Image: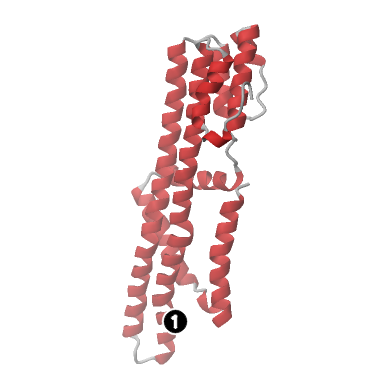
Amino acid sequence: MDIATFAGLIAAFGLTAYGIAAGGSLSTFFDLPSLAIVAGGAFGMSLIAHPFASVVGTVRVIGKTFTDQLPDKQRVIREIVECARLARQEGLLALEKYDSELKIEFLDKGLRLVADGLEPKEIEKTLWLEIDNTAERHARSTEVLINLGNYAPAMGMVGTLIGLVLMLENMSEPSTIGPAMAIALLTTFYGALLANTLFLPMAAKLKGRSRDEMMIYELIANGLQSLVAGDHPRMIEQKLMGYLPPKERFGEYG
C-alpha cells in the first residue's frame, strides 16, 4: 500500500472540506449538475482523445499505484546474485526451480527464459521488448491523466458559461438566479479541484513510479544478461551496484 498517495489525497480533499465547513456548509458546495458537467464532460473528452482500452487501462494503473509497492533494489540485486551463484554451481537449468521471494513477474519471466536455454541475444531482445512495451503503456496512462487535468478546468469554464446563460435568461425570476449562479461557480470549482488535487498529481505520481519501475526492470535485464554470459557473481554484484546511490551499496554477495 502506498501511504504517501493515500495521505496526499486525504490531506488535499480533507483540508479543502475543512476550509469549506469552517466557513459554511459542505452541502452548499455539492451540486450534482455541476459535477456531471465537469466529471462527465472530462471523461467523455478522454474517450474522444484516447482509445477506450487506454482509458480503462489508466484506471487499472491508478489502482496499482495505491496498492502495489515497488521492490527494493537492494533485494533485487541480492536475488540476482543468488541466482548467479546457483547457476554457477548447478547450471542454468537449476534456475527453472528457483523460487524467487520477490514475486516480480518480470524477473520470473527472465529466469524461465534463461533456464529454457534460449540464446543470449533472444533473451536480451525479449526482456527489452517487455521493458519498452511496459514503458509505453505507462506513458499512455500518464497522457490520459494529464489530458483529464486539462479537460476538467475546460469543462468547468463550459459549466460557468452555461450557468451565466441560465442566469441571464431568467433575470426576471429571482428564484432561478441562485441555482444558475451555483452552476456557474461550482463547475469552475470542481474543474480546478479535480485537476489540481487528483488528475495532475496522479499523472506526476505515475510518471515517477514508471521511471522507478523501469530502472528495476533494466537492473534485472542487465543482471540476467551477465548471468547468461557466465560472469562471476561478484562481478555481477559490483556491476549492479551502479543502480544504487553510494550510501545504499553493500558488500560482496549482499
Question: The residue tagged with tag 1: helix, strand or loop?
Answer: helix
* Nearer to us in this view, 4 or 55: 4
Counting every numbered tag in the picture gives 1
- Front-most of 28 and 92? 92
Q: Nearer the viewer, residue 88 or 68?
A: 88
Q: Residue at x 36, y 74 (%)?
A: 160
Residue appearing at x 35%, y 80% in the figure? 166
* 140 in relation to 27, above or below: above
Q: Residues within 10 Å of mark 1 (few under 14, many from 20)?
A: some
Report which quarter residue 110 is drawn in: top right
In the rendered image, which quarter is residue 176 located in?
bottom left
- In this rendering, does residue 141 appear at all? yes
Q: Quadrant of the C terminus?
A: top right
* Residue 194 location (% of width, % of height): 46, 62
Query: Label 1: which residue?
Result: 179
Image location (x, y in percent) of residue 32:
49, 71
Q: Is residue 148 above or below residue 101?
A: below
The reply to whether residue 220 is in sight is: no
* Colour theme: secondary structure
The disc labelled 1 sits on which kind of residue? Pro
| 149 left or right, relative to 243 | left
Q: Looking at the picture, how far across and down is residue 141, in whole percent?
A: 43, 44
